[in-house]
Amino acid sequence: MTADLTCYGDLTPLHGVVGDFDLRSPMDVHTWYHDQWRSIADPLGFTQAHEAELSRVSASSIDVNTRIRASNTAGINAFARALRDRDDGVTAAHARVQEGVLRQLLVDGQTSGQLWRVTADPMTVTAGACYPDADGQLSRAFYPDPSPGYFGDGWRGPPPPAESACGWTTPLTLHLGTFPWVYSTRLESSPAALRWTHSTLQPAIVGMTALARLLEPAGNLRQDARQVAAIYQHFRAQTEPLILRLPQWQVGRAQAGTLYSRAGRLHVHQGSTQIAGLMGPRGWISAPAYNYCVTRFAAFFALRRAILRAPRHPPGPASTRSSRRPALLCDLSFLDAGSTCTSALDYPPAMSHTALIPALFLLVLTACKEPDPEPNLPGEFGEACIPGEAQDSPDGCVEGYQCETYFCAADCLKDEDCPAIDGFLHTCSAGICDIFCNDANECPALETPLRCRPFGSAMLCLGDPPEGS
Amino acid sequence: MKISTAIAGAAGVVGIAGLLLYSGRASAASSPPGGAPPLGGDTPPPGGDTPPPVGELAPLPTAADVSGNLTKWGETPTDLRPLFVLMEETSKIAGSARIFAVIASRESKFDVAAHNGDGEHEAAERAASRRAYDNNKGRNPALRHGEAAADFGSGGLFGALAPYFLWTGVLELKSKAPLLNAPPELMFQPRAAAFAACVYLQRLLAHYRIDDHADIKAGWASPSLLTGDRSAKTYLDVRARFLADAQALGVDLRDPTTIPIKLSASAWPGVSAVFSKLVGALPQELG
């Protein structure tokens, strides 16, 4: 059965943008992730730094999951290096608040499965999302972005229950799935969030970390795909009429400097896409922003399809489905992609999702549930797990921990959140606690055996897949 | 005869009379080239209905094609940075990449198809290219598309006047200069425009008094600005605009890690080598 994700609406325009791949094939994974990071690095100007980072990690990759994490770490590191060459875009005070808010939204977004678009009451985040400007006045740390735009029809309310010190009257809304194009109404060629940098702090790195999370199988599964689909369908509805008016690029017939539609993306023949774009009812959308966003949407669903096709990666037995994982409900019809216990779950097209979901649950439960010989409980710190499994599911981790390289690692916002391990450095990196090897390249004795291995430029203690898997 | 006078005299023959006039004419680039037609307008024809372009060259270089640093470029389009770096690496004029970027920001706003001379109010531009052609055709090898070039005006990434663009390299290669048979529209191919710009910069650096980076832009506007009164308003205005352009673009002209204090063309590899690396072989119909 093909995991075509049709329940998310028509995604066919995305198929030609990012190709499918086999999550079980190390070569496929290497190529696909390399291409994805190139599609991020090229328009943002850190291609060279990315290639340099990647050359250091490719030889050290072990299994597919480690390879994926290494690819993403290389991408984030390269982005950080390139940011250092940029002038300050914000003040230190501004950056401090932005970073605090973004770290909080990163964790909240992952927990809620709504990381692509995070929405928060500004009063509940760091400093009320306000920072003191040069005159000592409090200003908003982010653009409010309340108007109808390319990602939605605006987020006007409800207003914050308490009065904001810096004038927030709408929720704080950021589209981290298309970072650094995070605002629905600001899709110019130079993305606003690239300016989230200061010589002392680089909040933009947290934004890029969120994007990278969505490129991990576990992070992809944790994201509610319905949210992504809804944003994509809105984006498509707003841009498709504009795209249809463009000529199609054809080999040997294109004119230099002319904007074309080419394989689902915008293309300026022999010229720069960065000075091109489309003007529509929702305002100007630059060609780089369009291409970047459509690629991110396509990559999200390509990865979701790859996960559902790969036997080791589809979500665990249906009985473990949690209501906190709405992202998977729509995908239930594809669960048999890696299973041997059911056949295709066909359903009439007119059947509503409301009716369909309980029916699917029932069907899958009936068809798939097998007796468990031993109780299998969600893992706590250091215990074994399977990446991609649901939180609090038998093969996943308990709340507050994430399955990283087959063991449950602690969630964190700062280093102090990482439990002390005698003799080992245990620090917070992009929302997860990393255990560093000691000077003798040893790892602590946890429930799951860990091995010391290179990870980017660091030596980390990483887990291995269970034997026989 | 002073050397500068001699060069200026020769320069007129080979097209060093200014790639562009100093008015900063980039009217064709004043609106983004890729904007979709306004809603409600005529639907554009499918790509297949347009005539095939003449002289299709290799695509723009990418980051993989160059070794120079692609950061510290301000707002220079990321997809054009490799071209500017390739120009620097090919011409062996260290630091020239970002100078080319600043020049392109003024002359074309980075639109490779910027064309000054096809508009109703661009008669001055057409007059300039006509004058360039008429004044020099007797001394230079014939251009296959000479009349078209004379009526073309200027354009491309670096705002070249069409006849001078097509005569690029004539001083070194005489009748074997590579663009003599090409149509002026070839300047819309960024690699061809880059070739002409490299040759032009080399000639400015090698034969004129260039005191600082802003002088390059003065010479780009017209070499006569470099040989005349350097307190003249036009000279000073061109320089001021260049410095403002660099600042607006975010290119730091005083960063010695990216741009030496003075550029030098002492390692210039020759017109043929530059053409070969930037453009390669011309399509048969142009060769």
Image (spheres, coloured by chain):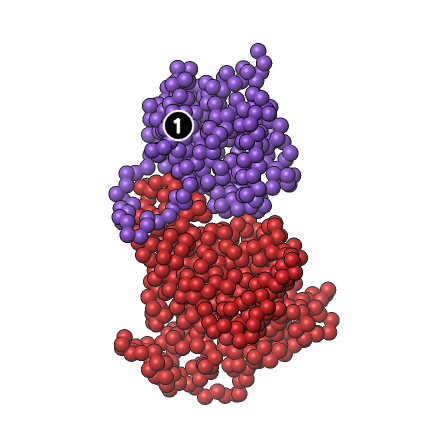
Chain colours: A red, B purple
Residue A65: give x, y in percent of width and height.
Answer: 53, 67
Residue A219: give x, y in percent of width and height.
Answer: 50, 69
Asked if residue A218 shows in the view, the reply is: no
Q: Residue placed at 41% from the left, 18% from the top?
A: B136
In the rendered image of this protein, does residue A122 appear above or below residue A341? above
> What's the amino acid at mark 1?
Ala
Residue A286: give x, y in percent of width and height.
Answer: 43, 52
Q: Residue placed at 31% from the left, 41% from the top?
A: A253
The picture quadrant where one finds residue B135 is top left
The picture quadrant where one finds residue A311 is bottom left
Q: Nearer the viewer, residue A433 or A233?
A: A233
Q: Nearer the viewer, residue A15 or B114?
A: B114
> SS at mark 1?
helix
Residue B155: give x, y in percent of width and height.
Answer: 41, 33
Q: Seen in the image, is B272 located left or right of residue B137? A: right
For disc 1, the marked residue is B124
Quadrant into which the N terminus of chain A falls: bottom left
* Few, some or many residues within 10 Å of mark 1 (<14, 14–19, 20+): few
Asked if residue B148 shows in the view, the reply is: yes
Q: Nearer the viewer, residue B88 or A382?
A: B88
Q: Chain of mark 1?
A: B
Q: Seen in the image, is A272 located left or right of residue B67? A: left
Q: Residue placed at 57% from the left, 11% from the top?
A: B1
Q: Residue placed at 46% from the left, 65% from the top?
A: A146
The picture quadrant where one finds residue B113 is top left
